Amino acid sequence: MIVKMSKLSIAGLMSERSAVVRRLMKIGAVELSEVSMSAQERERALGIASFDNAEKRIADIDGELRKIQEAIAFLTAAARECPSASGGKRPSAALSFDRFVDSSAYAGIWEKVFEVNGLHKRVTAKKTELNALKNDAAFLTVWENLQTPAALAGTETTAFLTGAVPRGAEAALLERLGETGLAVADTVSADKEQTRLFIAFHRSAEAAVAEILQESGFSRVSFGGRQGTVAENIAEVRGKIQIAAREIAELTKVSAGKYAWLPEIERLYDYIYNMRERRKARGNFLKTETAFLVGGWTPADCAERVKREIEGEFTARVAVTPPEEGEEPPVLLRNGKLVYPFEMITEMYSLPAPGGMDPNAAMSPFYWLFFGLMLSDAGYGVLLTLFCALALWRLKPERGAMMDKMLKMLAFGGVSTVLWGAAFGGWFGDLSAQVFGKAVSPLWFDPNSDPTRLLIWSFILGAVHLFAGMGLNAYLMIRDGKWLDALFDVGLWYAALIGAAMLLLGGKFAEVGKYTAMIAAAGLVLTQGRAEKGILKKLMTGVLSLYNITGYISDVLSYSRLLALGLATGVIAQVINQLAVLPGGLKNAFTVTALIIILLGGHLFNLAINTLGAYVHASRLQYVEFFGKFYQGGGRAFAPLRAKLKYLKLQ
Amino acid sequence: MNEVTVTFAQIFTNGTFLAILGAAAAVFLAGAGSAKGVGIAGEAASGLIAEEPERFGQAILLQALPGTQGIYGLLTAFMILNKIGLLSGNIAVSSAEGAMLLAAALPIAFVGYFSAIAQGRVSASAIGIIAKRPEDLAKGITFAAMVETYAVLALLASILAVNGITIQ
């Protein structure tokens, strides 16, 4: 059912604006918008009043939110690294709304955020330092065997050089240096790319040595003014690494010690986030120095309460009016416990147009049936329902949230799956027959041995679904007073299709069906061109409309997927069972273990892939075959101003 | 050792061989198509995840869609192998029966191959939809499911054909 909406306009004092917005957020049932006015009125209004420009402030708030998130992420990571110091997470107590929006409740929390972010900065700086030290250590380690002090460039008469040549070039280099008679070289270390050398030569041979070195691809390495030997330097750097690592550990421990602040900081996040929401809503306020005027939408049954609460508490006037002609109120759906999870399917397609019809009540039984028929294994149905029930119990999603609807829908779908699976004798495929040698007999029939029978039932279910869709179309036309259109566009097609079906089935009704179909076809030829001008065009369009029969046939054929996907689940389950008993079945502990592992992995995979398939194809049958017959989407979702909480729970 | 020579003609008129050829074709054609389709969708998905990692759940859903053809192929293969008793070790299939089973495998083999690739492309562009409008995931899924219809129909034709063939 589409909830009836009322239009609000609220006029009040600027001095009370923040309080009014807070109160509207507490009520949580009003979507604020600019007050509706004509272009002329708007121009006049803007002469004496203006709209808030909240963008700058919202950008600032976004910056604040990022800072808080940084603190939350850092504290969480620190507590994970150092669980003993964190003392575990303290649950935050549920808060009343008034307390939640009271800024004085957040005194001192920003300081904590800054302190945490300060710690974060220090840890980051230390980690950068640590990385640099590690790089130094890696560089120095390969020179560890160099005996001379790193900074020593030679003596009065000899010069020292350190550097590397590409691997393979060192033999020729050593030989040529030896030939000069004035140079010696020593290999310090080598890996698969480079050989590192220490070279000492007499200063008189400098030019000759330089030439040899250049020709062999020698690149000098310097130690940047380090004192002492390389080994001493390595020891020093390692010492520094230890210190830095210890400091990081200490800082992390200190940070983890602040973990107790997390609930407060998270509370601040929610507070600031909802402040942002209110700021955004303020953009709709037309304001002067002293007064404001704002429009909005609220469900008609909440309107009186909103009016009473706002007028009772503030110096304000609230006018409640029904939507005007041509105005499109936002759409809110309200359905019973069993139907409402299926709203998700419609929402993913498109919300109904404000004047349209909520298809969920009609759609959900079919979705439920088709989903179960396509998954069609009682064992899987039980598992799916249990999983979803467990998830609902553990996660406790907010009512109306996507997660809530999806889990409930799948849980219902699981029940349908159990029913169909029991009808077809599928309990994890033929698990019982394979493992225990005893088949579970189907309550109805086994589609594996008689697929044609299920195919026919699929077409029958499909035809019922399509007729329901057409019927809803007729209902919509009759509701709008166009009952002749309903008779021509739906009634005649009903007659033609039912007649054709009776003809095809044969038997004693074949004759009746033949004439029904012929009369209906003649009716279609005469009526379907009624929008055209000129008798010839009317007739042509009428004749051509009969071609739509192919559309109906392909629509019905499309429901063969009910059989195909149902069989797919069962056959894959059988494959898994056969694989599982291959090692030997219940022979010994080893084969039983193999059996269990293969069964668990295989059936979970099959359940996942076929649940996806059943969901996708059950949706498709609604979107294309069912909605295509009557549904008009395009509605805009009702988005009331309300507290959106990531961490907190409100009382 | 006695060498038994088998001519090509003998192999290709062997009913068991023809039936296994059908099963193999169903698996490798439909499977190759799915591999390609899932690959195409996966590339697009990775591109999106690099920018918006939180869309992973939606992207993996779209990537999985072209994977079903490979499963349909396996399913048909399994039905054929079951039919000829290969899995229970009881094989006696005439040439005509083998040829019929091979023919029965063709719909899902070919339609599976082409539809999986086409569906992979649609899924990839649907990932483009959720990059901009994550709330329109269902529309993207529906576009991809439109393609899959033909794989489902082909699977159905193959299943009905395999089921209808009686082995003496």
Image: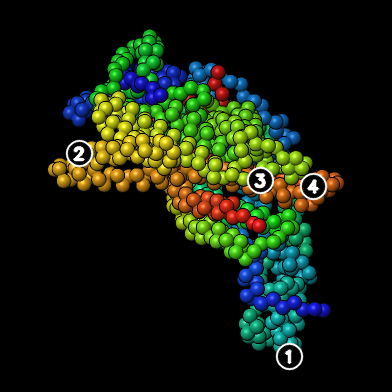
Q: Residues within 10 Å of mark 2 (few under 14, many from 20)?
A: few
Reading the image, the residue beneath label 1 is A179
N-term mark: 4 or 1:
1
Reading the image, the residue beneath label 2 is A531
N-term mark: 2 or 3:
2
Give, as a three-letter code, the residue at label 4.
Gly
N-term mark: 4 or 2:
2
Give, as a three-letter code, the residue at label 2.
Ala
The kind of secondary structure element at disc 2 is loop
The answer to whether mark 2 and mark 1 are in CB contact below 8 A is no
The answer to whether mark 3 and mark 4 are in CB contact below 8 A is no
Q: Residue at x 29, y 37 (%)?
A: A520
Reading the image, the residue beneath label 4 is A585
Residue nearest the viewer, comparing A393 with A554: A554
Check the image and report above or below for A402 versus A566. above
Residue A179 appears in the rendering: yes
Q: Residue at x 78, y 63 (%)?
A: A231
Q: Chain of mark 2?
A: A
- Nearer the observer: mark 4 or 1; the answer is 4
Q: Position of residue A258 (x, y in %)?
A: 66, 32
- Nearer the observer: mark 3 or 1; the answer is 3
